[in-house]
Image (cartoon, rainbow, N blue to C red):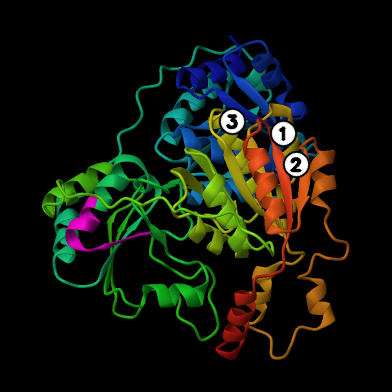
Amino acid sequence: MNGAQSLFKALVDAGVTTCFANPGTSEMQLVYEIGMTDKVRPILCLQEDVVTGAADGYARMTGAPAFTLLHVGSGFGNGIAMLHNAGRANTPIVNVVGANATYHQPNYPEHELINGHITDLARVVSHWAKEARSASNLGELGAEAAALAKTGKICTIVAPTNCHWDEANPPPIVSASLARPKTAAEAIARAAAMLTNGKKTGLVLGNLALHGEALDIAARIGAKTGAALLSETFPSYHLSRGEGRPPVDPIPYAFEIGLRFLQPYEQLIFVGALFPVATFAYKNKPTMKSPPGCDLFIMSSVDQDLTAALKALAEATDAAGAAAPRQPRTEAVAPSGELTAETIGQSLCMLMPEKAILVDEAATNGTPIFAATKGARAHDYLAPDNGGAIGGGLPLALGAAIACPDRKVVHLQADGCGMYTVQALWTMARQKTDVVIVVFKNDVYAILHLEMARVRENELNARMKWMLDLDNPALDWVSISTGLGVPATRATTAEEFHRQLEAALGAKGPHLIECQIAPRKDLAQLEDYIHKNR
């Protein structure tokens, strides 16, 4: 076999069979070999952040990695933003990046980077990155990357073209997934002592603790000890919520709201989550959302076996037999009147089917919708912005739909960041994915108006607004979506949206609804508060 065949055999033998791709000349041997087998499913995407973001969404819903196929350093660079999000979410992904032949790289052809190599670029967003030294080594790296990725790692293989076509040995046999380390008994004992000391306590969950057995165990611990179930601000992997699931409250993103939210807590125990730091440093403000003197303890890091850790903590607190609280169904009524985030949330709560996947990049409109859908039918919730890089919503929804073709995906998309990866709509249309996209068209980067309130002395002038507003020219999402192959409608009232959402959820295939809404009124109040207290 040749090197490309050895690589794909290693990946397929490890169960890595879905490929999100944007190939170029240096990947043609790889494309040819994929075309010669029915064991790899190739999915073409028109921009690299769509490739990497879709691989993120796929892995979050399957628990197993897909692999990407990217073209040289510049192509990999185009996909870095969504790889950063995936890395901060500890999502398993294998990247395969084509490169010039090893013997041609010293000739400095156009694709060679001016001050380094592709592996230098890859390392900043990969837990593991290596360049193949030979065709046989390419297969070996495939086996190694697949095994490591399954532990929640981003693994990047740089594949020079001669390593694709040269003769290669068969790849080594991939062993079962690497076992995650167990949490130390001393850490379990300390957490148990904190949970029984009578102080106001939050159990902050992240990653694999946010769904399945781990979440149920955490809920029993909370019920037994009185600890509140919290989550990291942007739930990684996915958060299981809705009817019949244990309620979990994410720590708010907005700094001032996060401070107020955590103010009552005397101690926080973290399981698969990090400390609640501010996303940005602000002048004369603390860098932590938790109050001064709050005891912060990481019981289990994201790399550890979180389910086993929570089982041990349940035993230590005598919570194994406790009844976990369950979210009741909210009985909503069809909304009417002005179209707002609240009325959209009301419709979603009523109409979303059981086992739906809700992807949320609604930005400033996300908070009221999250609250409104708390009692919706049982669903899984995905947040794309774990690394703070916006634009991941459409690719994440695409990947989730590929992973779970029998489940309806509902994606909430802010208009500004939706333009970052709008090419995902084309792949949704091509793959006939069952996705309903709800676009919040408020013609402004509303979050940046809040951030400007922290630094401006006076009101925004025209030059400032020119860099924050999106109304000149206004985006026409119906035309954009239709042009990329996804049918689209426009809603301007709560009644129109409710009817269009009901129709879209009742049909198969992708559909986009553009919602013309005004900026939230309470955000203006928050903006004023931030400005006065800067």
Q: Amino acid at mark 1?
A: Thr
Picture quadrant where residue 258 is located: bottom left
Q: Which mark is residue 423?
A: 2
Q: Which residue is mark 3?
A: 402
Estimate the spatial distance between the alpha carbons at disc 1 and disc 3, rounded to whole Å. 10 Å
Of residues 108 and 193, which is closer to you in this image? 193
Could you say where residue 521 lies in the image, as x and y percent from the top left?
64, 75
The residue drawn where x is 46% and y is 49% is 236
Could you say where residue 457 lies in the image, as x and y percent from the top left?
69, 90
Q: Amino acid at mark 3?
A: Ile
Give left or right: position of 343 versus 27: left
The residue drawn where x is 40% and y is 21% is 174
Could you say where residue 467 lies in the image, as x and y percent from the top left?
79, 71
Part of the protein shown in magenta: 220-230
Q: Which residue is mark 1?
A: 427
Q: Amino acid at mark 2?
A: Gln
Estimate the spatial distance between the alpha carbons at disc 2 and disc 3, rounded to whole Å. 16 Å
Q: Quadrant of the N terminus?
A: top right
The residue drawn where x is 14% and y is 46% is 321
Answer whether residue 173 is visible to the viewer in this image.
Answer: yes
Answer whether residue 156 is visible to the viewer in this image.
Answer: no
**Does dot 1 land on a helix, a strand or a loop?**
helix
Q: Which mark is residue 475?
A: none
Q: Is residue 49 magenta?
A: no
The residue drawn where x is 79% and y is 76% is 465
